[in-house]
Image (tube, rainbow, N blue to C red):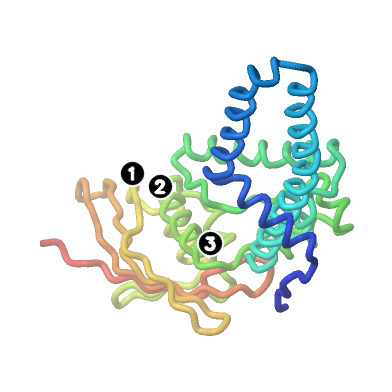
Amino acid sequence: MRPVRSSSWFAGFAKTTARVAGRPPAFFLALSVVVVWLVTGPIFRFSDTWQLAINTGTTIVTFLMVFLIQNSQNRDAEAVQVKLDELLRVTQGAHNALLDLEELEDLELEKIRGDYAELAKRAREDLRRGVVDTGVGQITGILLLLVGLSSGALRAQTTPSSSATILRLEDGWAAALVRRDAAYFERTLARGFIYTEDARSYGRAELLHELVTGTDTVTAAHNEAMQVHRFGATVIVTGWLIVAGRGTGGPFIHRYRFTDVWLRPAARWQIVAAHDYLLPAR
């Protein structure tokens, strides 16, 4: 889509007028007119004609400027709106139903604003629990009416697939280690998942059992220096996982060099393979 400059003389005149009227010289010119008018007051003995001159002049100028400046403001606002719409259109995971919100009624806008307020409330609650708040929640309510889709179709359409989402899932994995969150592991581990650590290899069921029922107690875990590598539909994440806790041998801090392979076979990203290398203690 190629923007075309407007050839309308009125649009060009309104734009130039608005730009010139907003500059200091225009203000000082208007101020000079007022000063001259005041100085000539005694000459005309402050007559009705003298007062009518300034009243008529300022009324005419103000009346005409209202239409010229309004035209310029309308075009600027529409241009900004189009740019925002384009950002929404090209952003993966964004709701396309939000493209023309300015056309909705006040009640519909209030319903959508309420959805976002609820999303912000849940994000703050996640922060208090130590969970990252960078996820993309689903906005329901009026959006379902706008696009005419079921909630399941909406989730499938708006599930994010950006690198930021993969990193968020990786951070979620580290947080799940502390909580022993079996539900999170089950959601993110694909069927047929394979895990290797040094000379050992685990299937999906074996790793789930080890993560949830292991003897070690994880008290803190976080990722460092993560990098995302894309190969078509496959995403590979490398980085460091630092895990602190207590085991049979006492307190420990382990540093793992990990490589995770992510695919999106359906509506969400899942890990299909992972490898961890435990850095030897110094």
Q: Alpha-carbon neighbours of circle 2 within 10 Å: few (<14), some, or many (≥20)?
A: some
Mark 3–mark 2 Cα distance, whole angstroms, equals: 20 Å
Q: Which residue is mark 2?
A: 178
* Above or below: residue 271 compared with residue 230: above
Q: Quadrant of the C terminus?
A: bottom left
Give the farthest residue toward the front. 43
Mark 1–mark 3 Cα distance, whole angstroms, equals: 25 Å
The label on residue 219 is 1
**Which residue does the image show at 70% across and 59% down from the upper left?**
79
Q: Amino acid at mark 2?
A: Val
Q: Amino acid at mark 3?
A: Thr
Left or right: where 76 falls relative to 261: right
Residue 270 visible in this rendered orientation of the protein = yes
Q: Position of residue 232 (x, y in %)?
A: 55, 84
The residue nearer to you, when weighing 247 against 26, is 26
Instruction: Of the two numbered discs 2 and 1 on the same chain, state the one appearing first in sequence.
Output: 2
Q: Alpha-carbon neighbours of circle 1 within 10 Å: few (<14), some, or many (≥20)?
A: some
**Element class at badge 2:** helix
* Above or below: residue 123 compared with residue 161: above
**Which residue does the image show at 32% across and 60% down from the upper left?**
224
Instruction: Of the two numbered discs 1 and 3 on the same chain, state the one appearing first in sequence.
Output: 3
Q: Amino acid at mark 1?
A: Thr
Residue 273 visible in this rendered orientation of the protein = no
**Element class at badge 1:** strand
* Above or below: residue 4 compared with residue 83: below
Label 1–label 3 contact, CB within 8 A: no
The residue nearer to you, when weighing 163 against 5, is 5
Q: Which residue is mark 3?
A: 165
Q: Looking at the image, is mark 1 or mark 3 nearer the viewer?
A: 3
Q: Looking at the image, is mark 3 or mark 2 nearer the viewer?
A: 3
Label 2–label 1 contact, CB within 8 A: yes
